Amino acid sequence: MALQFNTIPLTEIYFNGINVSEIYFNTVRVWPDGSPLTLIGLFFGGGSPATNLLTRIDADGALVGSESNVGSPKRVHGGASVGGNAMFYSGSGSSGVSTTVTRISAAGILVGTETTAGTGRTYVAGASATSIGLFYGGDTTTPLLTRIDATGTLVGSQSAVGPAGRRFRHAGASVGGNGMFYAGTKTSTNVNTVTRIDSAGALVGSETSVGSARYGLGGASIATADIGIFYGGSPANNIATRIDSAGSLVGSETMLGTTGRLPGGAGLGSIGIFYSGATSNLATRIDAAGGLVGVETTVGTGRAGLAGAEASL
């Protein structure tokens, strides 16, 4: 596949004076040579006490290399894919609530040095919007949004987004170029709310309500269909909820795989992969139709409270 302008193949592309080396569409490299982008699911932290264990899983549900220890321990934190790497933020660390930003490549290597940003809190959810990581909510008194760029630096100021009150134990996915955050607990009530936030930190449209209210679930982006899949949660269930970029339910919810609570999620192009949680070390793969892909696989070290994000090779 070649990228052309007026039938002429392009040899160089510049954006804001910067020479762009690669362009991808739905995980397929359309320039320069059409090679596919390989995505790996990175599942980091979790456990009690918090760990810094990293488990990498491919689209077949198989362990990539060996598990390793990377960066600072975290649990009940947020994950997002930013700049081709997986970014993990906040949560509970070895010395209490953390403000640490940990960036990890698909090779399982720490990217640069860890940074600190914003206000630490537990049970925050992460998603990306264009090239920004959005980390929303958490166990605080307001629905706080923290935006972090690919270098691990705070973008602008933190702000409260959406109706007042604590929003935590929810899940995030990147859909339609925005961060989408679904379900969780609002103050003291489990909700089925969809909140969409853009890279500028603004609410997109109005919040919607779809599917089954629950908390402690995982989220993943299905880039080929531009939808988010949200899976598992409590009360303990194996429900998959699919949501489009308008915040509407896609088809019907499905029930599949093994009941899971506090899993991590990552989007690997045409599937979402959900890993581990409170009761197992299972990897559950779900497609855009809400169906189970193959069989669940047993991978690595199970632990609750980890976070997932995809990184590209």
Image (tube, rainbow, N blue to C red):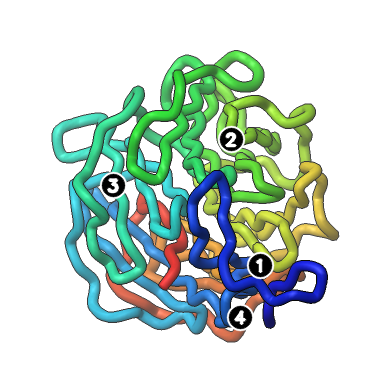
Residue linked to disc 4? 34
Q: Tell which of 18 and 294 is nearer to you.
A: 18
Residue linked to disc 3? 102
With 257 as the anchor, is 299 left or right in this view?
Answer: left
Q: Tell which of 306 and 236 is nearer to you.
A: 306
Residue at position x 47%, y 54% from top?
81
Residue linked to disc 2? 199
What separation in Å lies between label 2 and label 4 (alpha carbons)?
28 Å
What separation in Å lies between label 4 and label 1 (alpha carbons)?
12 Å
What separation in Å lies between label 3 and label 1 (alpha carbons)?
26 Å
Among the 4 quarters of the image, the one containing residue 30 = bottom right
Q: Amino acid at mark 3?
A: Thr
**Earlier sequence position, callout 4 versus callout 1:** 1
Q: Tell which of 165 and 178 is nearer to you.
A: 178
Q: Amino acid at mark 1?
A: Asn
Q: For the residue labelled by badge 1, is the local secondary structure a helix, a strand or a loop?
A: loop
